[in-house]
Image (cartoon, rainbow, N blue to C red):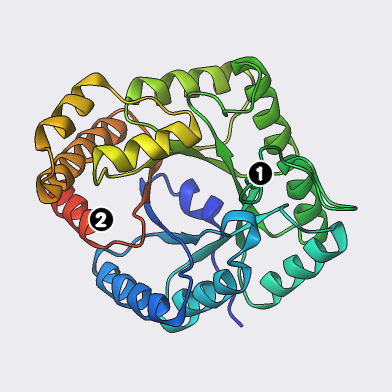
Amino acid sequence: MQPDIPISALLARGRPLRSLEFFPPKDDAGVVALRQTAEALKRIAPDFVSVTYGAGGSTRERTAQVSSLLKNELGFTVMPHLTCVGHSRAELEKIADRIHIDGFRNIMALRGDPPKGATEFKPSPDGFLHANELVALLKSRHPDFCLGVAGYPEKHPEAESLGSDLDNLRRKVDAGAAFVTTQLFFDNAAYFRFGERCHAAGIAVPIVPGIMPVLSLKQIQRFTTLCGASLPEKLVLRLTAAGDQPEVAEAIGIDWALGQIRDLLERGAPGYHLYILNRAKSALALAAGLAA
């Protein structure tokens, strides 16, 4: 099976990359809908797509199914996510081997969130507590894996300080991560401050900004509460004015994301990664806006 091109090789070309994130559906009907979304998004030719692992590993089999569908049937370069949640070292080795055999060469290596109902992350027996341990395992098992890791422009919610959060990121990069994809943010100043801190800390890999087009004020308040991102007052006021008109709120979200992306690219970001929530409309609208 022809292996995927490493994302590090794509980044080395110096052209801004566009990537999209899917999450595995819960049932077969969801897979059909995802296929339709992915087929619609082929027209904008993303450089790669990623597939999340699911809260608590609940959608692990679906991750493999969706990754295979996107790679083998639709021709995308796919970066499946892999987390430490619920896995021993031996289980992670087997999963890594299967991913490699199936031709995938890019993995998003994450610690993962605590399972639903848990308030604290606890490793499985003979499992890993930190993502840098997973990165080290994957690189030792298959050195040709290209690994992405997560970065938090406004600090991971569990980190004691910006400094300790940056130390954790540096450990992941030192273990072999080739690039960082950020958690969502809505103020580009947070991304550029984060980049400056990373540079000062000796973190030299590309930092890809993660962007989520807003669908509603309630939705984005829920997401930002979970991930620790802030919401600019100007965006909140616009969404509040939209009231209960979802189409207006979505248009506001697309316009805000478009402004973010234009500014990021003009100021040298290596591309952008879209958290699209398995919806094609926002990604297509952004591609059209950027082409104008």
Query: At numbered mark 2, what does the secondary structure look like: helix, strand or loop?
Result: helix
Amino acid, disc 1? Ala
Where in the figure is residue 287, as x and y percent of width and height? 20, 54
Q: Residue at x 22, y 54 (%)?
A: 282
Cα distance in 3D space between marks 2 and 1:
27 Å
Q: Quadrant of residue 188?
A: top left
Where in the figure is residue 241, as x and y percent of width and height? 10, 31
Q: Residue at x 59, y 73 (%)?
A: 64
The relative height of residue 206 versus residue 61 in the rendered view (above or below) is above
Q: Which residue is mark 1?
A: 177
Q: Quadrant of the N terminus?
A: bottom right
Q: Looking at this view, is 189 or 146 the one in front?
A: 189
Query: At numbered mark 1, what does the secondary structure look like: helix, strand or loop?
Result: loop
The relative height of residue 200 versus residue 140 in the rendered view (above or below) is above
Q: Which residue is mark 2?
A: 283
The dot on residue 224 is none
Amino acid, disc 2? Ala
Where in the figure is residue 154, as x and y percent of width and height? 48, 23
Q: Looking at this view, is 82 or 59 the one in front?
A: 59
Number of marks present in the image shown: 2
Question: Closer to the N terminus: mark 2 or mark 1?
Answer: 1
Query: Is residue 2 toward the left or the right of residue 128 in the image?
Result: left
Q: Looking at this view, is 163 or 250 the one in front?
A: 250
- Cβ–Cβ below 8 Å for labels 2 and 1? no
